[in-house]
Amino acid sequence: MRNAVSRIPAQYRQSRVPYGRQQTRELSDYGNPPAEPALAYFDFARSLNDWFVDCYQRCRKIWHESGGSADVPFIMQLAGSEPEKIVRGRPSLAAFDLPGWIGMADAIGLSLYTNSGYVDMGHASINAVVNLASLTRLLGKDVFVLEGGNEAPNVTLDSAEFHYFGAVARSLDPRTYIYEFFKEKFLEDYAYSPGKVVTAKGKIRRPAFNALRAMFAKIETTPAPPIKPVLYVISNSMASRGNLRAGLLNSALLDLAADLPIVGILYGRTPALESGIPVIQPDGTVVSSREGLSQLFNEISPADTPERIRWRREVAKVLRTRPSNRRDRALRD
């Protein structure tokens, strides 16, 4: 934050926002901010991003140098609910450089709770974070599923949610797959939580135990193929500073990742990419022979609208069509 504050005079001149004063306004007043105040919002969000990165790096240094664990990764944990916040927030939230975090971290941990507070139990956002985490495997790093389960709001025993939790991240070949809700507390928030395996009195709930054992048996014995992307995205968070279109593209791609295997690539660290798969550059340029794809990414509809739903369907339709391999390969070369 101190580093960000030191740049305020220059930012003041760019954004023309009165940093020295605060005003109370309704959030709806900021629905379509002009480009210059958006610089201030981006810079504020970026200062939080930089603070987080600095904290991680300093803690990791302590872990490796003083903890006697130089070969044990210092895990960065991502929540399954994070993509949804960026999808529904301002374009300037692209300042939070999630692919950059993955590129920097020793390893990535995932928190994959489903919850009845979401219309879809949170599946869309979880799917997106799993697709985002596929960059971890592309970089040769490990993924850990550190916690998960289903709440509605008590801990439920829902066969569909059990199946979803046990399958959603398997394409990442995680080192651990941890179910959160093992034992009841002595003072529970809810009278009945059938998804907790052991009661407060120490008795095993057989339905939960059997469901959990079956889920883990399937994880251990049934291999899952890795994610096969339909789109590569070369990420450069700073390209969204002062560029609302780039910020909107960033959130729209996370929205698409709820339904499609979209893989992010770090700017300047592009590995060998699979031939025939479209690539989006940081400036929004689409490298592909897929007819209509460039136009679709130039006409992104706002989030949470019927138009965005139709836009997602159209993009999915184009990305799932059989590519013109010869031309795509020529474009990539």
Image (cartoon, rainbow, N blue to C red):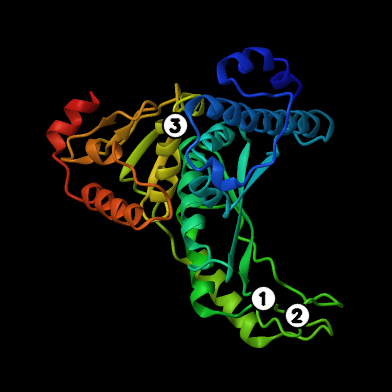
- Which quarter of the figure is the C terminus placed in? top left
Residue 110, compared with residue 8, is above or below; it is below
Q: Are marks 2 and 1 in contact (CB under 8 Å)?
A: yes
Disc 2 marks which amino acid?
Tyr
Which residue does the image show at 73% across and 28% down from the upper left?
Answer: 21
Q: Which mark is residue 255?
A: none
What crowding class fits label 3: few (fewer than 14 Cα within 10 Å), some (14-19), or many (20 or more)? many
- Which quarter of the figure is the N terminus placed in? top right
Marks 2 and 1, Cα distance to the nearest angstrom? 9 Å
Q: Which mark is residue 190?
A: 2
Disc 1 marks which amino acid?
Val
Q: Nearer the viewer, residue 301 or 170?
A: 301
State the image coordinates of residue 255 (x, y, percent, origin top left): 42, 50
In front: label 3 or label 2: 3
State the image coordinates of residue 26 (x, y, percent, origin top left): 62, 47
Residue holding disc 3? 244
On the rendered structure, is 6 left or right of 252?
right
On the rendered structure, is 69 left or right of 110?
right
Which residue does the image show at 57% across and 21% down from the upper left?
Answer: 15
Disc 3 marks which amino acid?
Leu
